[in-house]
Amino acid sequence: MKQEQLQLATSWETVKEKIKERNPFLADEDLVYEPGKEDALLSRLAAKMNRTKEEVKQFIESISHNHDIAS
């Protein structure tokens, strides 16, 4: 199922820092991203952020494309 593939417009490091600004309770281990293993990242963040995987995916992509904090 490829729907979990993230469409990032900026580097993961930039996106990760923006996520941490908005969610300081997330540890670096929670934000480990390996291309091709998006499902693991989304599942981990969904559990920590109390959101669905789709909501987390939209949040990450919004940050990446807007170069800013998303809701």
Image (spheres, rainbow, N blue to C red):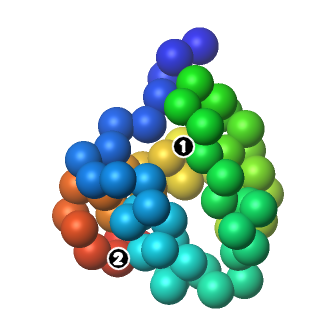
Residue drawn 52% across the image and 17% down it:
2
What percent of the width, then of the height, locates residue 3?
49, 23
The answer to whether 9 is drawn above or below residue 66 in the figure is above
Query: To which quarter of the image does residue 65 belong?
Result: bottom left
State which mark lies toward you, 2 or 1: 2
Mark 1 residue type? Glu
Residue receiving disc 1? 54
Q: In which quadrant will I find the C terminus?
A: bottom left
Residue drawn 21% across the image and 64% down it:
66
Relative to 54, 28 lies left or right: right
Residue drawn 36% across the image and 71% down it:
70
Q: Is mark 1 on a helix, strand or loop?
A: helix
Q: Are marks 2 and 1 in contact (CB under 8 Å)?
A: no
Mark 2 residue type? Ile
Q: How crowded is mark 1: few (under 14 residues within 10 Å), some or many (20 or more)?
A: some
Q: From mark 2 to mark 1, how far is it between C-alphas?
A: 17 Å
Relative to 25, 12 lies left or right: left
What percent of the width, then of the height, locates residue 48?
77, 65
The answer to whether 10 is drawn above or below residue 3 in the figure is below
Q: Which of 29 and 50 is in front in this view?
A: 29
Residue drawn 34% across the image and 76% down it:
69
Which residue is the extreme one toward the left?
66
* Residue 22 visible in image: yes
Residue receiving disc 2? 69
Q: How crowded is mark 2: few (under 14 residues within 10 Å), some or many (20 or more)?
A: some
Q: What element carries label 2?
A: loop
What percent of the width, then of the height, locates residue 52?
64, 50
